[in-house]
Image (cartoon, helix red, strand yellow):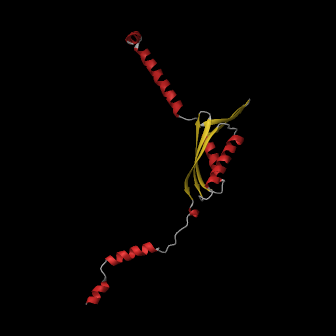
Amino acid sequence: MSELFEQANELLDQLPPFAIIGIFAVFVLVLLGLGSMLKRPPSRLTAFSSDTGSVLVSRKALQDLIRQACLRDEWVQAARTVVKISGSKINTSIDLRLTSPTNLKETSERLQSRISELLQKSLNFDQIGKIEIMITSFGKTDVDEIPATPDSSTIQAKDATLSTAPRNEDSEHEN
């Protein structure tokens, strides 16, 4: 092991300073290039290719297309989509606000099927990964609103506070 260090030290002693700086700069640029390639997901996917060229679809366009497909469903009030590419698979995460929790399973299965068909048939994407749906909220139409009149627990609480306060009636009767 110490022989390797000695040989490397001798080699560096023989190189001019500009060569060492150049080698170091190239090494740093290669590391930065690899790091940026690994961190940044592809911004577009090839839908299909032919002899005349390729058709590319941006991730943003896919996200908008999936969001619009979700919003066509009568039970969906709002949708936010995220498309990620892992290897050759397209993984989709969708946050939804539904009008009601009553048809949760049917709605989510219908949307997953619709999105899968859309990606397969319209855009020729065969490598479809997970389509995860997260229900973030439900619309206000599903909540049974309580009437504005106070219920019995509120009345009891008011009575309890009144009984602890000194009464003016008692002091009038004593006089």
Percent across and percent down for residue 31 are: 48, 25
Q: Is residue 82 above or below residue 25?
A: below
Q: How many marks on residues?
A: 0
Q: Residue furthest right?
A: 51
Closer-to-camera residue (22/34): 34
Measuring 54% from the left and 68% from the top, which residue is drawn there? 145
Closer-to-camera residue (26/161): 161
Q: Residue furthest left?
A: 175
Judge from the rendering whether residue 134 lies leftward or rightward of residue 120; answer left or right.
left
Q: Dividing the picture into quarters, in which one does residue 82 lie?
A: top right
Percent across and percent down for residue 5 are: 38, 13
Quarter holding the C terminus is: bottom left
Closer-to-camera residue (24/115): 115
Judge from the rendering whether residue 49 lies leftward or rightward of residue 27; answer left or right.
right
Measuring 44% from the left and 20% from the top, which residue is drawn there? 24
Quarter holding the N terminus is: top left
Q: Is residue 154 above or below residue 11?
A: below
Measuring 62% from the left and 46% from the top, which residue is drawn there? 64
Q: Is residue 28 above or below residue 154?
A: above
Judge from the rendering whether residue 125 lies leftward or rightward of residue 8; answer left or right.
right
Q: Is residue 42 above or below residue 150?
A: above
Percent across and percent down for residue 131 are: 61, 44
Percent across and percent down for residue 123 are: 69, 40
Q: Dividing the picture into quarters, in which one does residue 100 lie?
A: bottom right
